[in-house]
Every structure is written in C-alpha cells, then in structure tokens.
Amino acid sequence: MSKLKVDIIAENLLAIHPLLYKSISKPLKNKSSITPGGMFVMGILKRNGMLSMSDIGNCLSMPKPHVTVIVDRLIEEEYVERQHDPKDRRIVNISLTAKGLADFEEVKEDLVINLKSKLVMLSDEQQEALSLASQQMKEILISILSIEKNKEY
C-alpha cells in the first residue's frame, strides 16, 4: 500500500472519533451523569462481570490511573462497587450494582434511539453504504487489535 493511501486512512480514522462523539456521546451529557468513559467501563463490566482495575484497563487499553478516576466517580454515583476477591482478599474487583446496570441499559437505549433517529434521515443508499462500511471497519479494527495483541507476546 502506498504511503499516501496510509496517510489518507490515518487522517480519516482520526476524523471519525470527534464526529462520533458529536453525534453519539455528546447527547449523553444532557441525559445522564455517566461520562463516555464511564459507559465504556460499565459496558466492559456488563460483558465480563467482576473485573480488577488492571483487567478493566487492559480491556479498554486505558492506563490504570485513568481507570481509577472513572471507577471512583462511578462508585460515588453508586453505579459500581468494590468487592474483595473471595480467594485472595488483597485483590479488589469492581462490579456493576443493580442501579448501575439499570442506568447503563437506560442510557444505552437512549443513545440507540437518538442514533436511529439520525440514521433514518439518510437515504436508502446512504444507509446501505454506512451499514457495509461500519461492518467492514469493525472487522478491520478487530483485526488490527488482534495483530497488536499477538505482537505483545
């Protein structure tokens, strides 16, 4: 692949995050005290159950101090709680509370409804193109992460 093509892809990928933030995450600010980072942490906990701070950081590729700030705020809001590992009391895990799960699901549903309301304004051709492009992008990004993970070992 030519250097120019790689440069264009890199620029496009860097432009996507702020655009997604404006269309998806920004409306979250008006509906909930949960930050986008908090939603990421809560989503990982929903998928994986109880995790240590290090495991959360690894899942999200975030440094542990950043995870700690997010988790502390979620604890203040009673969305998550610390629990000692029953096998090793030195290990502290984080888990969603019932309130956290309920609020996470509510906010996620609000975000989906908001996003769908924007997507239906697109033409059928635009919807088809976005459907295909987003699926391909997801698969390629998963592939990139897989390659990076294999390089770590």
Image (cartoon, grey):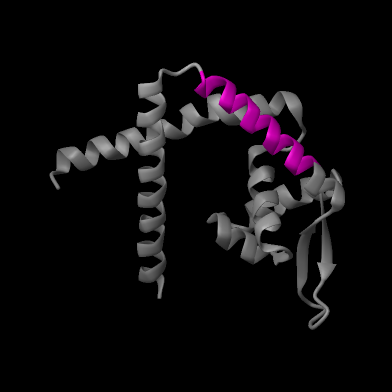
Residue 128 position within the rendered picture, expressed as x and y whole percent measured from the top left: 38, 30
**137 in relation to 31, above or below:** below
Q: Give me the residue at 74% from left, 38% from top.
A: 34
Residues in magenta, as a range: 103-120
> Which residue ends up furthest to the bottom in the rendered image?
87
Q: Is 110 part of what is drawn in magenta? A: yes
Marks counted in the figure total 0
Q: Give me the residue at 79% from left, 40% from top.
A: 103
Residue 33 position within the rendered picture, expressed as x and y whole percent measured from the top left: 77, 33
> Which residue ends up furthest to the front in the rendered image?
124
**18 in relation to 86, above or below:** above
Residue 4 position within the rendered picture, expressed as x and y whole percent measured from the top left: 16, 38
| Drawn side of residue 130 relative to residue 23, left or right | left
Residue 26 found in image quarter = top right
Secondary structure that dominates the magenta span? helix
Residue 94 found in image quarter = bottom right
**139 in relation to 131, above or below:** below
| Drawn side of residue 33 relative to residue 7, left or right | right
Q: Nearer the viewer, residue 54 or 147?
A: 147
| Drawn side of residue 18 relative to residue 43, left or right | left
Quadrant containing the C terminus is bottom left
Q: Give me the residue at 58% from left, 29% from top.
A: 24
**33 in relation to 48, above or below:** above
Residue 46 position within the rendered picture, expressed as x and y whole percent measured from the top left: 70, 55
Q: Give me the residue at 54% from left, 20% from top.
A: 118
